[in-house]
Amino acid sequence: MRADRLLSLLLLLQNRGRMTAPELAAELEVSVRTVYRDVEALGASGIPVHADRGPAGGFRLVDGYRTRLTGLTDVQAGSLFLAGAPGPARDLGLGADLTAAQLKLQAALPAELADRSRRIQQRFHLDAPAWFRDADPVPHLARIAEAVWEQRILKTHYRRWRGAVHRELWPLGLVLKGGIWYLVARAAEAEAVAVADAEAEGAVRTYRVGRFLAVDTPGERFERPEGFELTAYWAESTRRMEAATRRQTAVVRLSPRARRLLPMWFGAAGVRALATAGPPDAEGWAVVELAVESDAVAVGDLLRLGAEAEVLGPPELRRALTAAVAELAGRYR
């Protein structure tokens, strides 16, 4: 581990130039005292590290010195696919490997390409979580990710809306969607035979990682289902879920402000609804067709638009909204 850290320190100085001890400590996730010890170790091994004193000081390599010790380990190479998402990489336990891989890659690039890479990092950033919503706490994510990678069976305790259950799962893949981690898995063969409900009949299912109460990896390995592709499964699963939840269409009259808010609050369904909008009336209101969930859910969603919207149909949904508004009016009278 110390050899990897020394190489990372060396590559940081090579790629970024002068850096202070606190800056190096933050990058390497160690103490400032450890940085000073590591710099001494580099100097003792013949690496020309120079210490500049004063407010603008720091450590730097003597001009012209470059190392070519840039070989990637298999884990570091595998972490590069998360290069645009350092937060999720840390969640998966790959933060240090990703940093080391990026430093090695930059050190191996010609000067012009290395400079372009640094400019891209300074100008573009991917922030996965959605606005106004904290990400799930995922204390078991790193262990689940290890089981996915090593194809090891997971024994889990999972919290469903109907109550917690114990499941033995074959973890097939992890997906990050809107800042939320999901595990794609199927029930282990022995449990699939023993349990008769649809969830445990060997079908591939999606589990929200934040709802795992406990996970254990007893060590047994499994064989991935032949022909299974994570991206294809996720695309089809997303399509099925949207089709199953948004089963009816609401005809809604919207103010100009509500039309601006629709994509923010209803996502892709809101964007599609705007494409159906008729011409605005004299007051600027327009009628759209919006895919919504069951009446109970749709009432809550549509009330977010307040007085900026009027549901014209179907009649059952309009009656449900009328009842909800009347109850609210009575409560705040």
Image: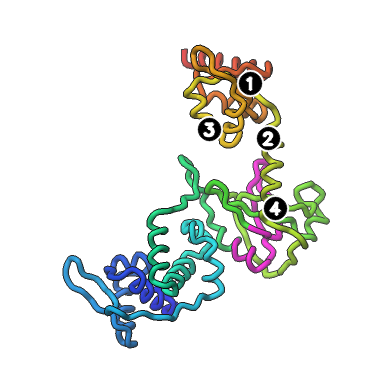
Discs 2/3, front: 3
Q: Quote the CA–CA distance across marks 2 and 1.
A: 17 Å
Q: In this view, does 230 lie above or below 150?
A: above
Q: Mark 2 points at which residue?
A: 245
Comes first in the chain, label 2 or label 3? 2
Comes first in the chain, label 2 or label 1? 2
- Say which amino acid is labelled 4: Ala
Which quadrant of the view contains residue 32? bottom left
The span shown in magenta is 145-173
On the image, the x and y values in percent for residue 329 come to: 51, 14
In this picture the colour scheme is rainbow
Mark 4 in CB contact with mark 2 (< 8 angstroms): no
Residue 265, numbered label:
3
Q: Quote the CA–CA distance across marks 3 and 4.
A: 27 Å
Q: Quote the CA–CA distance across marks 3 and 1.
A: 17 Å
Residue at 80% x, 60% y: name it: 190
Comes first in the chain, label 4 or label 1? 4
Q: Mark 4 points at which residue?
A: 232
> Is residue 129 rendered to the left or right of residue 222?
left
On the image, the x and y values in percent for residue 165 come to: 68, 50
Q: Quote the CA–CA distance across marks 4 and 1.
A: 33 Å
Residue 105 appearing in the image: yes
> Is residue 155 rendered to the left or right of residue 286?
right
On the image, the x and y values in percent for residue 80 come to: 52, 65
Q: Name the residue under label 1.
A: 251
Q: Quote the CA–CA distance across marks 2 and 3.
A: 16 Å
Q: Residue furthest front?
A: 112
> Is residue 197 rendered to the left or right of residue 77?
right
Query: Please, what secondary structure does the residue beneath circle 4 have?
Result: helix
- Say which amino acid is labelled 3: Trp
